[in-house]
Amino acid sequence: MRTWFQIAVVGLALLGAIAPLDPETIERRFSTGVYPAIQQAMTPVSNLVPFALFDVLTVGGVVALIAVLVRGVRRARRERRLGPLWRALAAIATGGAVVYLLFLVMWGFNYRRIPMGERLVMDRQAPDTATVMALGFQAVERMNVLHGEAHRVGWDEDPRQDRLLLDAFGFVQARLSDAAPAVPGRLKRTLYGPYFRWTSVDGMVNPLALEVLANPDLLPWERPFVAAHEWAHLAGYANEAEANFVGWLTCVRAGVPEQYSAWLYLYWQVSGEVGAADRLRLRDALDAGPAQDVNAIIERLRRGQLPLLRNVSWVVYDHYLRANRVEEGVRSYGEVVNLLLSARFEDGWIPVRRATPSGR
């Protein structure tokens, strides 16, 4: 019975990985149906816990894996047969399958929901370089205007205390889908903080506990956008470009410090999409204050990162995204520029949703 159970669990996990699921069904039944209820139940609980549950789950998982493997090897040596080792490997495979199924049910199916490009009215195809540069100069202009007031007001250590940011997050969610609004997550420190630093990762969502982990070195003007980006993941927008899109729309509707964080992020993103000469033009258009903030981010990244580990980490993450049917892999981060330049907006960067079933 145990063998058949293990086969069933692994088989179910494989089916979950390869089954061609209908995005409309995922959108209706999971992303705007079951998932919001899960998130509204889990995130408030994880917010109450002062430490990262991800640390407990991963460290505990590694300890359990080593214990099962060591026990299997010892029994195999003692009994002089491979049976105990094969059983240990089967138990590990079953455990991995269970974790993957939990990942899908708790959050992972959101990768298969209706794409943002089919949810919104899109007025144009991929923009050209001139259009991208115009957006970049708009970001520079807004940074120059907002910098002084943003630094005068300052940024909350805990973005959940920012009422304007919370209201903007709720507004954007309501404009994009009919799902119940997500509960914002607390930005937690984690044992993996050094890894975030070494690999230039700003944050992540723990898909099994629906909590937010953040890089401990984030600068104050980076924190609002990173928080809004991760909250977008909690709202069920698993695709990185879509989380960037939701996070940006959230910050740009909030207070001046959050708007500054949004435009600084967009400046950074556009600079990564254009050539060296155009990147220099954007940088030279920055006033001294915003330029100093950008240089502080660059210094933070240079001071902490280990290039080899960073490159390996992003290659692994690229494979993870592609395995979850994000065809662009890590390039999906940059797709936010296409969304901002192709989607139709009302005044105030309010996205226009399609009046079709796909726009639900």
Image: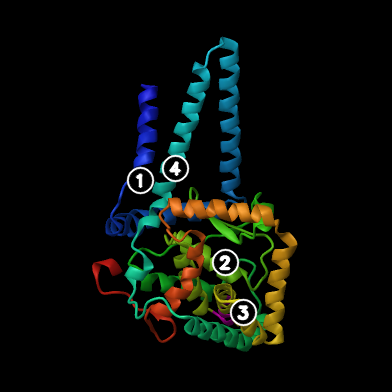
In this view of the protein, which residue sits in the foreground, 235 or 159?
Answer: 235
The CA span between labels 3 and 4 is 41 Å
Above/below status of 12 relative to 351:
above
The CA span between labels 3 and 1 is 41 Å
Amino acid type, callout 1:
Ile
Name the image quarter holding the N terminus.
Answer: top left
Dot 3 and dot 1 residues touching (CB under 8 Å): no
Magenta segment:
255-261
Label disc, if present, on residue 279 of the rendered structure: 3
In this view of the protein, which residue sits in the foreground, 225 or 181?
Answer: 225
Say which residue label 4 marks.
100
* Residue furthest left in the image: 356
Of the numbered discs 2 and 1, the one sitting upstream in the chain is: 1
Q: Quadrant of residue 65?
A: top right
From the top left corner, tell me how far across and down residue 38 is, in percent.
Answer: 40, 52
Q: Quadrant of residue 343?
A: bottom left
Name the mark nearer the viewer: 2 or 4: 4
The CA span between labels 2 and 1 is 31 Å
Give the SS element for disc 1. Answer: helix
Name the image quarter holding the C terminus.
Answer: bottom left
Amino acid type, callout 4:
Tyr
The stretch drawn in magenta includes residue 99: no
Label disc, if present, on residue 226 of the rendered structure: 2
Amino acid type, callout 3:
Arg
Say which residue label 1 marks.
18
From the top left corner, tell me how far across and down residue 205 is, in percent.
Answer: 52, 55
